[in-house]
Image (cartoon, rainbow, N blue to C red):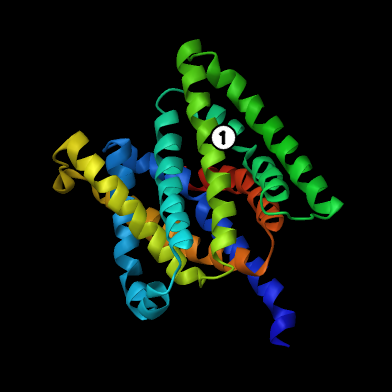
Amino acid sequence: MKAVLQKPVAYCQMAIAILLFGTSLPVSQVLTKEIGVFEGTAIRLTVASVLFLPILWKYRNEIAKITSIDAILVILIGASLIAVSGLMLGSTRFAPCSVICTVTCLTPVVTGLGAILFVRDRPHPGQLGWILFAACCALLIRSTCAQSDSQNCESMMLVFGVALSSVAVICEASGILMAKVVTRRLNPLPLAALSTLASVILILPATLIGSGYVDLAGLTTNAWLAVFWWGAGGIWAGTWLWYSGIQQTSATTAAVFLSTLPFVTIAMSWILN
């Protein structure tokens, strides 16, 4: 009975994670109106890592036994969290959000291709068909909005913004595939905790050197709410649920769920704004 419920539970976990991830972009815009991109990313990851500390303590014995290869993958997953956050937020400085979101619609396609090439997934034709269909629909919706927004944007700035978001797509797909590999041997909870902690260790020195001092006391209540929601919801809860889901399913299934993210983001942006 437990085995029968594994996949439905995993699907529910991934669906909730997508809902949480869908709030990230609109919430991040609240924060980055008052603070820099890397400072905001560092604060977000720090909040999530503090929430993960009890998990690290609970699974300390399991963590102590991880292999060097898994440790390297955990660090790379942490680096991908920084790269996706930093590149996506940085890209919005050069191009409109509608243009950036048009590019990110290709993330499920890149993830699906990576699953076939590197993780040796054998997806069902229906899964591939849905990924392509959802990507095309999302691209159509986004590009319609992006055309009007991009008219007011300088061409070089637009190209640079699109380039940053394209690299972010590759980093996100790589992080998903690496997480799928690690969850074959490591529980999703310590994986989420370790990768978040690794991302904080990587980003904090660079943030402190680059910005020096961050006036946290100067943030408004809305910015602090955005920080805690982004860290607690988008990373702490979202990452754990996402890793738990992909442990029980395939990387291609993750790409199927990921293909719904643009539509969730649109809906969340409309609701929050």
Q: Position of residue 172 (x, y in %)?
A: 53, 45
Residue drawn 71% across and 39% down?
A: 135
* Relative to 228, residue 65 above or below: below
Q: Is 11 in front, or is 198?
A: 198
Binning the other alpha carbons within 10 Å of mark 1 as few (below 14), some (14 to 19) or many (20 upward) gives many
Q: Position of residue 243 (x, y in %)?
A: 54, 64
Can the viewer see residue 222 in this picture?
no
Residue beneath label 1, please?
101
Can the viewer see residue 221 in this picture?
yes
Q: Is 129 in front, or is 247?
A: 247
Residue drawn 51% across and 70% down?
A: 186
- The kind of residue on which mark 1 rests is Cys
State the residue lying farthest toward the bottom. 1
Q: Is 48 in front, or is 58?
A: 58
Q: Is 115 in front, or is 165?
A: 115
Q: Quadrant of the N terminus?
A: bottom right
Question: Tag 1, which secondary structure?
Answer: helix
